[in-house]
Every structure is written in C-alpha cells, then in structure tokens.
Amino acid sequence: MDTWRKLTAKQQPSWPDAGELTRAAAELRSYPPLVFAGECDLLKERIAAVARGEAFILQGGDCAETFDAVTADAIRNKLKTLLQMAAVLTYAASVPVVKIGRIAGQYGKPRSKDTETRDGVTLPAYRGDSVNGFEFTPDARIPDPWRMVRMYHSSAATLNLVRAFTTGGYADLRQVHAWNQDFVASSPAGERYEVLAGEIERALRFMEACGTDPEELRSVEFFSSHEGLLLEYESALTRIDSRTREPYNTSAHFVWIGERTRDLDGAHVDYFSKIRNPIGIKLGPTTSPDAAISYLDKLDPHREPGRLTFVVRMGAGVVRDKLPALIEKVTSEGHQVAWICDPMHGNTFEAPSGHKTRRFDDVLDEVKGFFEVHRGLGSHPGGIHVELTGDDVTECVGGGDEIVFDDLGTRYESACDPRLNRSQSLDLAFLVAEMYRE
Ligand code: PEP
Ligand code: MN
C-alpha cells in the first residue's frame, strides 16, 4: 500500500520537522473514517450509470476550502447552490444527476510556483489551509503537519452538517422554493429558477393527488470529493474495508489526481492505483491519446464500470481540437469511462487589477465545445466539474449579473482560484440543461 513512498511525489510540502509529521500522521491513523467503503461503492455504481450514458455528474465547490469558512452559513449556501443547480438539471434536462461536492476535504493546493513575491518580498507559496497559512508572513508560510489534523476535523464537521442537511429534510424536493428564498428578488437567475421551481411544485402536487409520495424525493444522495494531493494525509485515512479486505480512502467518497501530479510513474498515480474508491484524473491539453490509455491500464486495469472518471480541462480555445482524439482512442479500447468537463482551469487569466479571474463566457464556451465533441462522436457528455460558492462574490467576470473587471475588488474572497457565484452557477446550470436537451 505504501509503495508510493519510493516514488517521486510532486507538490508535497517540505515539512520542517520529521518527528512532528510522524506524530500528526499517527494521530490521523487513530481517527475513525469520514466515509464508509459501501458509500464509495454506491457512488461507483452511480458513475457507472454516467459512463453508460444514463446520468450526469454535477461536481462543484470551492477551489480551496478554508478553516475559517467552516460555518453553517457558508456550508448551507454552497449546498443550496448545488441543490438548485441539480434541480435545474434534473428537471430541465430530464436526467438523473449524481451530486458530488468539492467539499469536506478540499484543503490542499498544488501551485505553479513554489514562492510568492509581494512588494519585493519573497515567501513560500500558500499551499492550502492543510499545509500553511494564507497570511503573507514568514511564520504563517511554514508548513505545519498538525494542520492536516485540523483538516480532518474541519472535514468531519462539514460532512456532518452536509449529511444532516441532505437527509434531515432540508434537501426534500418540496423545499425547492425555500432554497431560493433569499435569492429570488435579487437576480435574473433567481427569477428564472422560481418559475422552474413552480413547475416542479405542480408536478409534486400532481403526484400527490395521484396518491404517490416517493421516499426518494425526501432526501438526496450527496457525495464528497477533493483532490488527493497530500499523500501523507490520504494514506493516513486509507483503511482496509472489513467486508472486502480492500483498501479505501475513507477521507472522501471520490478523490482525483490533479493536472500537476499525474505523472504516470509518480507517487500519486501509484497511490491511486491501490485504493478502491471511484477516482478521477484531470486531463489538460498536453494529454496524448496514448497517455489516456496508460492511465486506464494503471488505474483501471480491470475496466471496472464507474471506477475512472476523466475530468477534462482543456481551455475553451482548444477543447474542440484536443478532446476528440482522446475520446476516440479510449472508445476504440471498448471501455466506457465517465467523461466530465472542468471548464474552469483552462480559462484562468490575470485581470488588469491583478486578480486571477475567468470569463463566464469562456467557461460556457468550453462546456459547449465539450458537448459538441461528444455529440459528434456519439459519446456521452457525462457531467461538469466547477468551482463555485453560494455567496455573492465577484471573482469571475460576466454572467447574468454582468460583473466587470472593476467589480473584482468588491468581493474577492477566494483563497486560490476564482469561483462562480450563486447566480453565475445557476445561469450555468440552465445553459447546460439546454445543451443537454439539444
Ligand atoms: C483545481 O482543481 O483546483 C486544480 C488545481 O486543477 P488542475 O489540477 O486541473 O489544474
Ligand atoms: Mn482551482
């Protein structure tokens, strides 16, 4: 299980004290699992349906969760946004939606540069709350392995609230209007949603009048996910399932390998090849068709339905050129994987103000390109992976609220990449539902 330790692991912090690291990892090993292996298997079944073309994945949440944002309001707002998007997709596109939060564990960040310079001062880069502090001081930027222990507790608190919300009545489809209450008056997306919610409500009343009241509508299946970046953390939370005697990563239902750590012979690919969770791998524009097959061979040698999800993040400008060869090659192998589109990470640029941002139109165009390519090849556009928040931040430009460059400073709160705000997220869901129907 620990063979990854002999290989090159990219993007790992230089922990300053090996003894502290060992003690923090031992503490993590003593804790209970955050998710059960059986739940991971259920998600694998759901993703297998996506790979067969029968369902659609909605995966979303912050680029980087922070310890300070583990509050009831922030968690509820994110969940509410995802539930609203899922309602739009399920109803308007008539497709079962597999809901996966980028939540309860998304605390470690890969960086394109190891250092950050401000006003002539250079310090180690911020690597996420699980590693060091966001504050631009030498002390804050020293990696501290006990932050991984706090990551566990923050993930546990978040997941606990998510489970309470999703099974305790809040996610009941009869609440479809309530999720929108504070939103409806303030945004065109909110108003559009209100109309759809009215239709759903009428459909529910119709079903009730016919004497049917399905239990499925009272709660929602919701899964957790994060990038499996910090191998010390991921391996400390890896446990042998008592039913199957197989290893599972019990820190989340779904974990993925990032664009910067997907070396075929690297530590991440090796670690992921050993766990039995459903897993993802980000594929950027430099991925060759042969590499995609090598990932399949290493990560899914038994071609198990639902095991592997390719999360493509090409950029709006190249998705139409680069994606077809990958799909053709994988399809020619006779294997069905889930293909989902991350329309965020290939479309990031710096605004004149210095803020990292993305254009809503580029995000939309990449999803469009993704759908066009799949439609052209007869394969299934299996879902979207987006960075979003339930708060009214101003981090991406465009969308129904027409955020412009000058607005970015108003409410830019992301600790890493720019996220869609609530109304941009809903706009996207409506537009994706239209593409799906076409
Ligand atoms: C991310 O998902 O936040 C990320 C860093 O993506 P990628 O690995 O695709 O660059
Ligand atoms: Mn990101």
Image (spheres, rainbow, N blue to C red):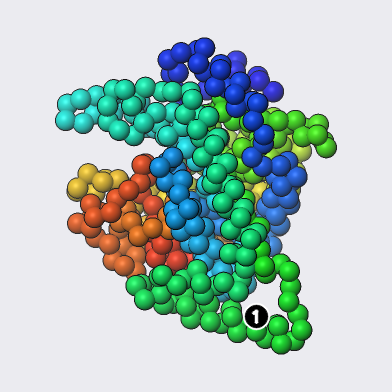
Residue at image location 57% in from the left, 41% down from the top: 156
In the picture, measured across the screen, residue 198 lies left or right of residue 337, that is left
| Quarter location, residue 436 | bottom right
On screen, residue 200 above or below 243: below
Q: Is residue 341 above or below residue 28?
A: below
How many C-alpha atoms fall within 10 Å of the one at disc 1: few (<14), some, or many (≥20)?
some
**Foreground residue, 213 or 289?**
213
Q: Position of residue 385 (x, y in %)?
A: 51, 52
The percent position of residue 263, horizontal first and vertical second, equals 54, 28
Q: Depth check: 327 or 237 in front?
A: 237
Q: Mark 1: which amino acid?
A: Leu
Location of the C terminus (image quadrant): bottom right
SS for callout 1: helix
Q: Name the residue that disc number 1 marks.
A: 204
Q: Residue at x 52, y 18 (%)?
A: 21
Where is residue 124 shown, x and y percent of the image?
32, 24
Where on the picture, by quarter, is residue 221?
A: bottom right
| Residue sitting nearer the eye, 103 or 149 | 149
User: Which part of the image, by quadrant, shows the N terminus?
Assistant: top right
Drawn side of residue 428 relative to residue 219, left or right: left
Kindly indicate the quadrant of the structure image that contains residue 274: top right
Q: Residue at 55% across / 44% down in the picture?
A: 157
Q: Between residues 367 and 390, which one lies in front from this camera angle?
A: 390
x, y percentage for residue 416? 37, 41
Residue occupying image coordinates x 62% and y 53%: 163
